[in-house]
Amino acid sequence: MTDVLVPGGRDVRGSLDRAGDAGGTGHARADACVVACPPHPQHRGHRGDERLQAVSAVLTAGGVDCLRFDYGDWDEGYGERADARNAVAWARERYDRVGLFGFSFGGSLALLVGSEGDVDAVSALAPTARLTSDLDAVAAMDDIDCPAQVVYATRDDTADWEPVVERARELDVALREFSADHFFVGQAGKVGDAVGEWLLDAL
């Protein structure tokens, strides 16, 4: 793992998990990286989130690096979107292919930033439909032109996920359903497999 300072006007720090670091699998330098967006920073969301770490473990075992980052100071979703954009730009300068993943608040950001066209795959875990009136993840999905996945929990009563799933079905986006609550308690490993393996295939 390598500490990363993400360039931009905000204090955004990340951890780059490198392929082969943990397992010693001897991969050559990775040519793909997934940027992982944590959940809501005002609800203790951070780069060490177990769902982000579970996805990263699958990616690095498969030869893809993963950049997990912390947002800068809270900015109602706007600064956090900029943080995700800057993290993608950092990865884009260093890798041939870049994926984007996020959980909850971060899942919505992944859809929003993924709609801007600078990534090769997007996966959103338990995203909510919108962050503000003009940060609308459902509307953003119409502009995603790369492979996309939405993973959701049928017992999630935290996020407003139903509109996201409905639009994903209309757009023929890859869907994965879990019988779980919003936090996928006890199922982080299964979530890591579902998201990580899909991203490995997509990248």
Image (spheres, rainbow, N blue to C red):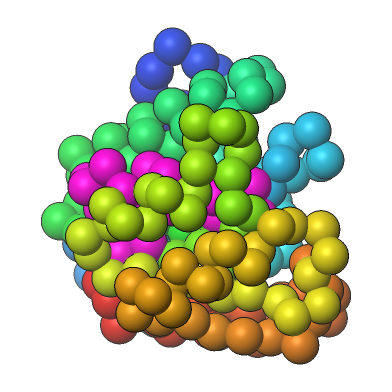
In the image, is residue 102 above or below residue 51? Answer: above
- Which region of the structure is painted magenta? 104-122
Position of 143 relative to 174 (above/below): above
Where in the figure is residue 136, as x and y percent of width and height? 50, 42
**Is residue 64 rendered magenta in the image?**
no
Q: Is 113 within the magenta?
A: yes
Residue situated in front as seen by the camera: 12 or 125: 125
Residue furthest to the left in view is: 96
Image point (54%, 50%), residue name: 108
The answer to whether 164 appears left or right of 104 in the picture is: left
Place residue 29 in its image quadrant. bottom left
Residue 54 visible from this viewpoint: no
- Lateral position of residue 184 relative to residue 132, left or right: right
The residue located at (60%, 58%) in the rendering is 127
What residue sits 64% from the left and 24% below the top? Answer: 76
Figure disc tally:
0
Q: Position of residue 128 (x, y in %)?
A: 64, 54
136 or 175, nearer to the observer:
136
Residue 158 in the figure: left or right of residue 35: right
Residue sitting at x 84%, y 65%: 157
Residue 26: horizontal and vertical position, in percent? 33, 77
In the depicted view, which residue is nearer to us: 146 or 51? 146
Q: Position of residue 188 (x, y in %)?
A: 71, 76
